[in-house]
Image: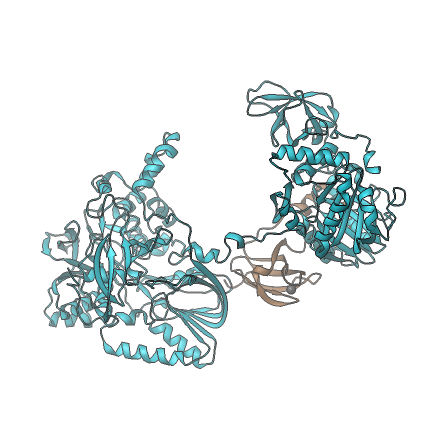
Chain colours: A cyan, B brown
Amino acid sequence: MGNAFRNKDGKYIDYTQILRFTFDGKIYQGYKGDTLASALLANGVHLLGRSFKYHRPRGIVAAGADEPNALVTVQRDHARTTPNVKATQVELYEGLIAESQNRWPNLRFDVGALNTLISNFIPAGFYYKTFMWPRQAWGKFYEPFIRGVAGLGVAPTEADPDRYSQRFAHCDVLVVGAGRAGLAAAMEAAEKGLRVLICDEQNMFGGSLLSNADVQSTESLLQTMEKLHQYSKVTCLKRTIAFGYFPHNMIGLCERLTEHLPNPAKGDVRERLWQVRARHVILATGALERPLVFPGNDRPGVMLAGAARTYLNRYGVLPGKNIACVVGHDNGYLAALELQQAGATIAVIADVRTKPVGRYIEQARQAGLPIRSGMTVTGTGGYRRVRNISVAPIVNGNIDASDTIRCDTVLMTGGYTPSVHLFSQSRGKLEWKSEQNAYIPSQSTENLSSVGSAAGLAGNDRGVIGALPMTNKSTAFVDWQNDVTVKDIDLATREGFHSIEHIKRYTTSGMATDQGKTSNINTLGIVSNILQKPVPEIGLTTFRMPYTPVSFGIFAGFARGDLFDPVRTTPMHSWAIEQNAVFEDVSLWKRARYFPRNSESMNEAVARECLAVRASCGLFDASTLGKIEVVGPDAAEFLNRMYINAWSKLTVGKCRYGVLCREDGFVMDDGVVGRLATDRFHLTTTTGGAARVLAMMEDYLQTEWQDLQVWLTSTTEQWAVIAVQGPRARDIIAPLISGIDISAHAFPHMSIGEGTIHGITMRLMRVSFTGELGYEINVPADHGRAIWEAIYEAGQAHGITPYGTEAMHVLRAEKGYVIIGQETDGTATPDDVGLSWAIGKAKPDYVGKRALIRQAMQAPTRKQLVGLLTLDDQVVLEEGAQICATAANTPPMQLIGHVTSSYYSATLGRSIALAMVAGGRTCYGKTLYVLMPSAAIPVTLTAPVFYDEKGEQVNG
Amino acid sequence: MLLIKCPYCGERSELEFSYGGQAHIVRPLIPSDITDEALTEYLYHRDNIKGVQAERWRHLHGCGRFFNAVRDTTTDHFQATYKIGEAQPASGAKSDG
Ligand SMILES: [Zn+2]
């Protein structure tokens, strides 16, 4: 069969360029300018797929984005397999490979079609009703079964290798749709000298003009295009859909750049997301043709009349040779006339209206076409292709005896529905026009206008909506893609679903990937008829984006792989890599977790690192700590109001541990604040809290305390921070430092000073998160690695050992130092975690002070920070495990706390844990039970400090 | 995506801003003096208006300044943006949307 249905009059077909393609493994020929749908029709192929639920044979209904049936998979390779694309929108190229979907073992013989036979037993809501019980069977049986038989295409099996780009654009006027009205609007704006962007989903501009037979429309189209291209401020985007209308005239466009090419070059951008901000938007989105609802209207060969005109005039393809027309709109006569002109036989024109009058009807009469009015359709015949249609007159409101007429194609038309999707997405109000049987744009909230048939139809161009009179409702399809019939809607209304929102969800009408482009208005008409209520009283479902499906690729854009999230690394990162550090992610940072030597396990490495810190000295990269420079005459007062601590008496050259609460009294962050001058502080935050703390401080400074003269600067990335911790720390760094006397009496614990190290400017803080004598050396980030290496070198004689975050965690837990976000969870007060000593009690105010005096915040039964020691000292508890007062592991049990930190401590030769336990501080010595998967583990409650209780080491 | 007029920088894309919740909630001058009820009101109770509301924004990835805005939540239209400390401009009860 070689293009048996093709003539030489397709206006936009290049007959000199023959293209070969395969569909379901069979090779066909088409021409440049074809879509997959037009090329298949030219070859007499109407059967393109199986339906979603009943696996009924399905063909091509439409010629564009409204196609509900002809979904195929287009395959380039395993990674470039695109399922569920509409054959009507696939541009043909040499070597195109397409496959039908939802059929097994093949399209012509499909086992799932058994569902057709039992379709009477799969009514609306069937899945809800049948598969609800027993519940366990859902995941094991029902869902896999349903997914197996009811499905569309299959996703590609390999990662997408293509490039997707994103672009922002601004314009005075964005025109969506390049048909007659859109082009005219674009021309008008261009002539005014405005910046214009006009887009259309098709591969060429022209819209419905492309479907016309007359030569005039082609001529005027070419002229307009030529003029439009002369304006430098006009951008024309073809193959570009406007998929979403966002607030403030932001329109999302998806431009397809390589889908139509036989061999896209490697690295070419496949699709581009345009985020267009337009001063004014003109919606010229046209109107969609409405199908008629009658029994057997889903058989391959049943097609929209307007679509048939497009295939004939644009592509030179006759959908059939013996054509029956069922019409509710004059457009059906035009289709019949043009097809007869092209050599087809018109078997019948069954008009569902009683007394149709109009220009095309008169022409059809004069051409001798067999017109019958006041008709309905009682059914169609044929299996893989329609073979006949039965029509019957309506006499006194009853269906009379029917005639069966042979045909190979049935054209149907119920008229047109303005495409108001984008208008509705813009939150514009729609208004029902009963004389047009259509919702049309009314008040808009955005700066936009609708033009052409998107704004409404001419005069009383109402056509028909709803279902034709019928008795057999189970094969009269309203929604082809989701297999929803009149019977389903009938049933839903009888079961009490009267709101269109409920009917939509219960029947799934309009919920398929075509978003109800062909089905929504007919569903409304049917419900209106059943409930005997006017359409506006039924309600209208929301039009949601996207207008047609778009790929995930455009949203991801370049944000994939290494570019998915920024990676933050410290100045010493490269050194850690060279030392074979194992890293962990802490917010966006990569932090060295431990430094394994030879074949050490993590536990072995961490034990070695901990012991080294306690015995001699460790070297730790603390650069990720948030750092903020607080400057100004009121800096101390500002800190007084922010932190729970008192700062006024902190002298220059001293540091203090600070705790930040939120206004609700719960601990938010902590860190060290050092005073460099009366009006200058250097403060640190947790790694993850840096941005949050700065934002909170700015908030108070800008909105509540405008009286304060304080300036905040984030210095997190300006300083590399090297922690040198352990009894030998001073010995190691002293020879490198000048400008500060760091002897024990001159520079005691919690001192801060400025000097140089190895010739580089330095801020030195004597602080400890390990419980040992320790320093945190801040140097400009550029010098971080050099100074780190200098210290490492100087420490060799003392056994200096680099350690990672895991050892840091163990060391601080041995001391009972909390980590915000680990011990605290956003509901812990300073007192809960043993930090009430930090509160400046004499201060009249600080953030959180008022909330902390609420009764509930001081209840003795609140969870409090405690230590846990397992009776078996080698058992390491699970962090997050719940704690119970009794060993009886029989629910219901009262849970009185949870484990927050748990490690094996090499220093102590046993396991340790921190926990939050209700009223825990009054229960030291008591035995509690930690619920672990294996058993309830007995533990003894202790104070939350396991090493150097008196805190003497830090003063070394 | 909203187009927001920062009172300091002019119109910028929503991408540059962070939302800051209801505006004109004033921190008590001396919080210690207020009742539990007043504290609860201050900390937790927020309006959820279908219509015109005053709200806080911050031009986080721009000038970093906080400012206030009057927005109609049904249309997303901003009626005004203004600096911290300025009074909320008078507006219609509900915009035409
Ligand atoms: Zn700004």
> Can the viewer see residue A605 in this picture?
yes
Indicate which quadrant contains ligand 1: bottom right
Depth order, front residue of A612/A943: A612
Residue A544 located left or right of residue A676:
left
Whole-percent x and y of residue A544? 41, 55
Q: How many marks?
A: 0
| Picture coordinates of residue A533, whole percent (x, y) | 32, 52
Please state, as top left, top right, bottom left or bottom right, where the N terminus of chain A lies in the image: bottom left
Residue furthest out toward the right: A745
Res. A451 image quadrant = bottom left
Say whether residue B90 is visible: no
Spot the residue most to the front.
A797
Whole-percent x, y for residue A744 in the image: 87, 42
Q: Is residue A547 left or right of residue A666?
A: left
Left or right of B31, for residue A346: left
Work out whether residue A856 or residue A151 is closer to the camera in this orientation and state it: A151
Which quadrant is home to the C terminus of chain A? top right
